[in-house]
Image (cartoon, rainbow, N blue to C red):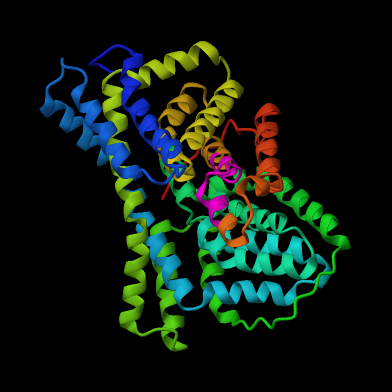
Amino acid sequence: MKSNQTKASPLGLLPLLVFLLLFIGSGIITHDFYAMPVLVAFIIASAIAFLMNSKVSLDKKIDVFCKGASDPNIILMCIIFLLAGAFGSVSAAMGGVESTVNFGLSILPQNLLLAGIFVICCFISISMGTSMGTIVALAPIGVGVANQTGIPVALALATVVGGSMFGDNLSMISDTTIAATRTQGCKMKDKFKMNFLIVLPAAIITTILLAFIASGSQSTLTETHPYNLIKIIPYIAVLLSALLGLNVLAVLMGGIVLSGAIGILDGSFSFMSLLQSASSGMQGMEDLAMISLIIGGLVELIKLNGGIDFLIEFINKTVNSRKGGEFGIAILTSLVNICTANNTISIVMSGPLAKDIAQEYDIDPRKSASILDLFSSSIQGIIPYGAQLLFVSGIGGVSSFAIVKYMYYPYLALLAGIISIAIGIPRKSKTSKISKAA
């Protein structure tokens, strides 16, 4: 849909170019791609957008920006971010993560430790909705397994990151899933089912490959791993409730209450500590919520200045089919993620344009949401300057570049995504009606 204010113009994309120059430039200069605060970079880019297009008054630009930032999808997305942060924090504080990890380690066959750790990471990340939270919990265990079995530390850490990215891509409460489904207008359970069909073969092949690689190692763990099955219940309840199609706000609030009740009853924390833990989790999501608001307003200004129309016209010249549109979305989110080193932000940034492409070429919203999430999460797992690989490289004392070559799951997931687009699966049903996200 073209703007009524201006014609398509590549100059409209200048704010995005400014953002990329600030973010990437500061990373190259400081050797730290997280030195430049992302929120500050987006605010500077927004200021550039306000200075453009002299034919439109400042009052009009402010109105356009505020309407973009206050879009119902963005506001709801921010609320879901906050509740997801609270659930993750409260569940971890009552011992849910520790019990889940220890339970998995206790039931694993000793000759399948590496493959088992991958499966545990998949489950924990899909339950917690965060790759970083899973990595923080499992990376030290991965290093311990490597030291005791002779498996390369880089391989063990890559296994942890790979499993963590599996859940980050699929989890009902992952910020990437929230962003992908809200920007594309589909239900989380529908996106999950389609996404799961695409990446399951990659996860199965990874598990088999890891079992084969570690088959000759002396796999033994001497520590005991105490756990409490009751503390695992909130994660299972949230996952099943979301899959059943319950409203995501109700699911998250129910998960917080359930985790809080278990924590209070077993003495993990007091009522005030519960509230403080929930607050801490919400605070951890505040930056992401603010960034989403700023991006929502910035995208509307870029659209007003003709940038979105230019991109659509450019894509229309190079894409002339549904398959081409799907590849266009995959390339778009991958490039943005390479530039920002943040899969959630890359989805929030590329989501509006991806929706325009999906509508133009009749792409199933479930498929466009799956492509956004799958490609951004997979790319995030293999860039050596991403937060995930930088963190585990510090834990294991190995270069992040040494870990990249062992990132089997992200590579296989990317391949699965490309194959699913190339052969057109899952196929869109002509009679299916995809309703908006709850």
Magenta highlight range = 376-391
Return the x and y of residue 316 as percentages of the image width and height: 49, 14
Return the residue nearer the eye: 248 or 295. Answer: 295
Return the x and y of residue 96 as percentages of the image width and height: 53, 74
Residue at the outermost right position: 216
SS majority, magenta: helix
Residue plotted at (52% across, 29% down): 329
As for residue 390 lying within the magenta part, the answer is yes
Residue plotted at (52% across, 22% down): 361
> Which quarter shows the N terminus?
top left
Return the x and y of residue 309 as percentages of the image width and height: 36, 17
Residue plotted at (38% across, 59% down): 249
Q: Is residue 141 left or right of residue 186?
A: right
Return the residue nearer the eye: 108 or 63. Answer: 108
In this orientation, does residue 351 appear? no
Count of marks, rendered view: 0
Return the residue nearer the eye: 81 or 223. Answer: 223
Q: Is residue 260 left or right of residue 242?
A: left
Quadrant of the rendered image containing residue 380: top right
Q: Is residue 146 left or right of residue 396?
A: right
Residue plotted at (47% across, 57% down): 173
In this orientation, does residue 156 appear? yes
Decide: is 61 above or below 10.
below
Q: Is residue 196 left or right of residue 352?
A: right
As for residue 264 lying within the magenta part, the answer is no
